[in-house]
Amino acid sequence: MKVQSWSGGGPKNIPKCKTQRGYVKLNGIKMLDKPSCAGGFSGDATVSGLHLVRIDALLCNSKKTVHFNIQNKNGLKDYLNKLPNHAVIAGVSIEDAMAKRLVLDALDAELGVHITDVKYRGSFAFVAQKTTKKNVVDKVMTAASSQNNPAHLNVNIFGMSAKIGAGKWLLKS
């Protein structure tokens, strides 16, 4: 699985937005693909924020993709609470997901993903499993660093089989 985020840039911190793509690929197939701003800040509320892809690790496909623009304080927490135990989630920040840091505490509580230390327009990418809180996280703390090298991961999930069950897996990055 390959996961990559991107960070927007505005005139105050970065004059031109470098065109990038945020994505989640599973076995080379894009489960999520969000382009960055083309030459400037996109400001598109349907793109900016946190994107999560629920992965069926047994079948190697995507079960569902959801977007949180971080304006709804309870949306992310409710979504994570409703996930079944041992659900596998890939997440990427797109543009600026840190606008409402308090909302992101749910990622730490439910998935063990601590990203509240990422600065304004920094970027993050993760793959995590609910209940066990096993995760692999990449964080790029600042907007300038994220423009040059946004958070990204290459992750393999091993140990899934019908005999083992959904609760047994191992992440390797």
Image: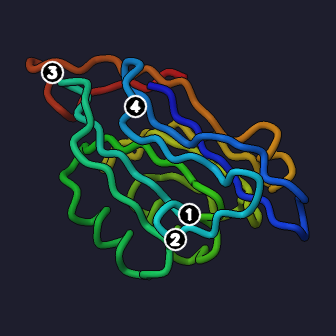
The answer to whether residue 108 is visible is no
The answer to whether marks 2 and 1 mark residues whose Cβ atoms lie closer than 8 Å is yes
The answer to whether marks 2 and 4 mark residues whose Cβ atoms lie closer than 8 Å is no
Q: CA distance from mark 3 to mark 2?
A: 41 Å
- Identify which residue is drawn at 25% across, 43% down: 86
Q: Is 152 above or below relative to 162?
A: below
Q: Which residue is mark 2?
A: 45
Say what secondary structure mark 4 lies in: strand
Identify which residue, 85 or 21, lies in the foreground: 21
Residue 77 drawn at (x, y percent): 36, 71
**Image quarter for residue 87?**
top left
Q: Which residue is mark 3?
A: 164
Q: Label 1 crowding class (10 Å Cα cut-off): few <14, some 14-19, many 20+?
A: many
- Identify which residue is drawn at 31% across, 40% down: 88
Q: Which residue is mark 1?
A: 48
* Protein image colouring: rainbow
The answer to whether residue 10 is visible is yes
* Lower sequence index among marks 3 and 2: 2
Number of numbered callouts drawn: 4
